[in-house]
Image (cartoon, rainbow, N blue to C red):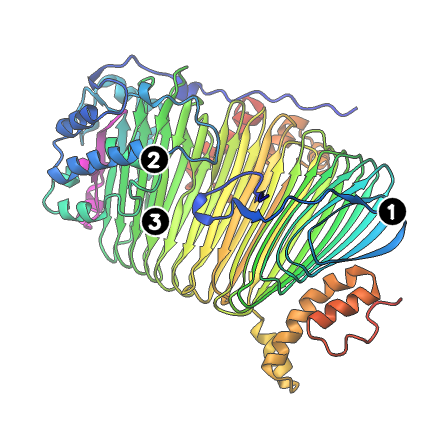
Amino acid sequence: METKFSTRLPVPTFRFLGVNGTERVLPAEPPAPAALSGTGIQRLDITADAAFTVTGGQTVIMDIHAEQAYLQTHLQADANEKIRLVQIFHGDCVCSRLTADLADHAAAELVQIYLHGTDTVSDTEIRMNGRKSALTANIGYLADGDSRLDLNLNVIQSGKKSVSDIDVQGVLRERAQKIFRGTIDFRQGAAGASGAEHEDVLLTDPEVVNKTVPVILCAEEDVAGTHGATAGQLDARVIFYLQSRGIPEPEIRELIAQTKLGGVIRQIGDAETERAVWRLLGREDADEPVTEE
Amino acid sequence: MKQKTQVADIDRSLYDFRYDEDAADLLASGITPEIIREISEEKGDPEWMRQFRLHSLEIFAKTEMPPWGPPVDGLNLDNIVAYIRPKSRMNTDWNDVPENIKETFERLGIPQAERESLAGVGAQYDSELVYHNVRREVAESGVVYTDLESAMHDPRFAEMIRTHFMKLVPPTDHKFAALHGAVWSGGSFVYVPAGVRLEIPLQSYFRLNAKGAGQFEHTLIIVEDDAYLHFIEGCSAPKYYEAGLHAGCVELYVGKRATLRYSTIENWSKNMYNLNTKRAVVAEGGRIEWVSGSFGSHVSYLYPMSILNGRGAHAEFTGITFAGAGQNLDTGAKIVHNAPETSSHIDTKSISKSGGISTFRSAVTVAEQAVGSRSSVSCESLMLDSISRSDTVPVMDIRTDQADIGHEAKIGRISDDAVFYLMSRGLDEQSARAMIVSGFADNVSKELPLEYAMEMNNLIRLEMTGSTG
């Protein structure tokens, strides 16, 4: 049975911009979530519809290379627990929904990397209800060809002194199109909370389309929230300098794009996965150690 | 234990006085074809304008309310009186203005401002301009500053108005643009010839006195190549329990290498729905500079739009929004980079207090052909308590790799350290906080002429402390 999958900006805005939400039709109903057991690093190879619940103390690395698939993930971090989730998307037509509940002093570390997928929709909602709960999110993307990348991240901070830190690094090439909606929502009662979000996008070809929607919602006086976003081209001075060192321009462009994503890849914290990601980026020397094992 | 400073709401006695309606024409409430025809007849519209009004009404009937932004449920358009003509035709001699209207504007300081710091002034009372005057030397330089309706009937400008009126903001733009197209009345027409630089500003002041009424003035400004104009717009209304509506429209045409600065201090009463549309198109090397202070109204939707159509055109938007009790102010700016090497800068501040809701909303779009364009957006919000709300909803839509676009937003509270420092210098806590908020609004006040900056700072001080100290 077909199911609708939709994402939406928490506060709608001007319709002509086409950023208020996205809808897709899934060919089947999502499967029932499976609870992951055990601790240590768990690697999941995802090639079809799947649903998981990740609990405190777990580190999960998902390699998502499905076609036409729906992935549902829920993170449940109870008091003082820590969860680490790494998601590498490089499939086609993937819809992903990630939710998280963070209790007092709970922490979630999230790394999401999107590479080359033709039509990826990712909807993430992190509910930071717990006092001093913490979120670190490192997101990287490289979209090329005719890729469509639609990312929606909604961080709801209702816990006192909760802290979120979101860093997004991206590269758009050829005719790729991307929307990133990033919301920090300070709810009433989140006294002492802070949230920071930054997106930095490198645009390398004239036909790319980049839409960025960095939203801050605030119903609490005692908070500190910041947003930053930059989008731009390769720095001509950097290209000139590297050319003067004998590197041809196409190679320079590749190098700069890889450097941009390198910071996110290093956050994976698992050498095997990092090497796999570098290989996806076309690095022939990817078998060299990147992170100390 | 930390104690909060108690701050009073604004003393609006300066703006809240009112007179009994003494109108010559007060049409029935509601928006119907009959009422549109009556307005058109009353104004002696040319046939094209009569047809335009009726066509706009059709669009209005078919268009839905915007599905985003603050609720407008309290606004019943069936109860709004669309047209009220005061018992006075347009005058160019202040002595000819009826006594109660004259007293209204005198209390608001308009004639004094005209004498001291303006090149010309227009005053609209309810639906019609009641006074318009421009200094002789300004008129002699070829600058035209008159009411739009007179200009529409003047053979020198009739065609110019026909080719520019609601071309930038067509009635299909949104429901209230369509409403405006149907019932517009009053407003100003300004024409600055090529090469003329008007170093002192022109001002229009809009006053809505009648209760349950709408004001739908239309401002059309054409600044030709290499010319300069600073236009100031002020507005206020006394408070009633019935909802009032302001759905004005501003269309600005900025020529090559010309500059237009458009400053607004908006201080409608807190029963008003301010659903205003402002738009500028800028030719090669031209500049549009918006300076905007939003202090009044119950609900505001206000996003001045700059369309940069010429190579090297530039837009600046500097704004402050202060939302107090019972206010939901949704303000911001839209910039369209449509040509190469265009640039824009948005710098806004917003303050929320006593349950007020302030939303900054923006859209920066960079078209494929706008190579080499640059844009920066900076918005800062200050929350003065936890019963208020402050949201920031910016969007960037970039369709070329040859552009540099930056955005930064910050939200927070008044720093305890800054208050402590000022108190150590002898200020009491209330004054220290008021001073910090005034400083926070510095981006706007330093862009206004001195008299207006002082008025704005007084408004902020009133909001913060309940006195002008």
**Disc 1 to disc 2, how far (Cα)?**
55 Å
The residue indicated by pointer 3 is B280
**Disc 2 to disc 3, how far (Cα)?**
24 Å
Is circle 1 on the same chain as circle 3? no
Is circle 1 on the same chain as circle 2? no
Whether residue B133 appears in magenta in the rendering, the answer is yes
- Picture residue at 63% right of the left edge, 25% below the top: B387
- Picture residue at 33% right of the left edge, 17% below the top: B211
Amino acid beneath label 3: Ala
Chain to which the residue tagged by mark 1 belongs: A
Looking at the picture, does residue B439 appear above or below residue A240? above
Q: Quadrant of the C terminus of chain B?
A: top right
Q: Quadrant of residue A199?
A: bottom right
**Disc 1 to disc 3, how far (Cα)?**
61 Å
Disc 1 vs disc 2: which is toward the camera?
1
- Magenta-highlighted residues: B126-149
The residue indicated by pointer 1 is A37
Chain to which the residue tagged by mark 2 belongs: B
Cβ atoms under marks 1 and 3 closer than 8 Å? no
Whether residue B35 appears in magenta in the rendering, the answer is no
The residue indicated by pointer 2 is B63
Residue B437's spot in the image, x, y percent? 59, 35
Disc 2 vs disc 3: which is toward the camera?
2
Few, some or many residues within 10 Å of mark 1 (<14, 14–19, 20+): few
Amino acid beneath label 1: Ser
User: Can the viewer see residue B261 in this picture?
Assistant: yes
